[in-house]
Image (tube, rainbow, N blue to C red):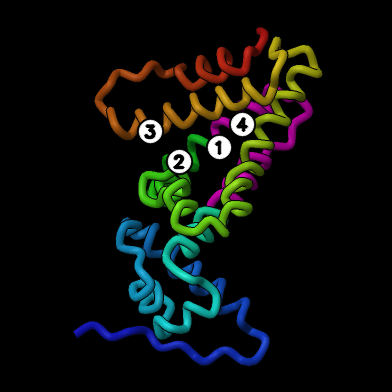
Amino acid sequence: MATSKTRARNKRGEGAQLRDEIVSAAVKLVDDGMPQSVTLRAVAREAGISAPSIYMHFSDVDTILLAVAQQAFASLEQELAAPDDADPVVRLRAACAAYLHFAEHRPHRYRVMFGAVWNAGQALERAPALADELAVLGMGAFEVIRRTLADCVAAGRSTSADPFTDATALWVGLHGLAQLRVAAPLFPWPPDLQDVVIDRLALLLD
């Protein structure tokens, strides 16, 4: 018979640590391939706490999955911004490659981030108070792409007249490529398709 994990009681002032442990437990359930099984009871069991303890930090599963998505987007933003190169085109290509790598190697978190498991729009309908947090979800990662494309324009390496719109198109292209590679693994994907998507959507010059 399975038993719940046991966990030492937090000392006074360690509430933030408990919150982090709850999010980590939810992330582990997601990474283990069970994102649709993230329930208050399952998270509590994984964290080694009682289910009512969660309510000190999260009101429901939506707020837990929002925290998981926020953490995942923060990791993605860090990875997109990692390249340190003076050439903006090199940085843009590296950021796009990092995006696709993240989607491939953290597929379950990616599904939470982009609505395949947890839908931010539906969460907003259930809890309008989340509007401010949902409005900025993922914008830090997007800003890395937009800013890097703007650097390409400033360096005369892109003909984009609207980096925000073209960065949005690039994001859509990367997301579509990431999803379609999973959905159609037997399709004869051109080996240089990633560069073609980046070059055309970012309007890069040779």
Q: Residue at x 67, y 9 (%)?
A: 205
Q: Which mark is residue 98?
A: 1
Camera-side residue: 69 or 123? 123
Q: Which mark is residue 94?
A: 4
Q: Are marks 4 and 1 in contact (CB under 8 Å)?
A: yes
Q: Which residue is mark 2?
A: 103
Q: Are marks 2 and 1 in contact (CB under 8 Å)?
A: no
Residue 75 visible within the image: no
Q: What SS does tag 1 mark?
A: helix
Residue 96 drawn above or below residue 5: above
Give the distance between the C-alpha atoms of the residues marked 3 and 1, in whole angstroms. Answer: 15 Å
Q: Which mark is residue 179?
A: 3
Q: What SS does tag 2 mark?
A: helix
Q: Earlier in the sequence, mark 3 or mark 4?
A: 4
| Label 4 CA crowd tier, 10 Å (few <14, some 14–19, many 20+) | some
**In this view, which residue lies farthest toward the top?**
206
Residue 186 drawn above or below residue 108: above
Q: Percent from the top left, x then y, of residue 106?
A: 44, 48
Please state which amino acid type lies under the numbered disc 1: Ala
Q: Is residue 77 magenta?
A: yes
Q: Earlier in the sequence, mark 2 or mark 4?
A: 4
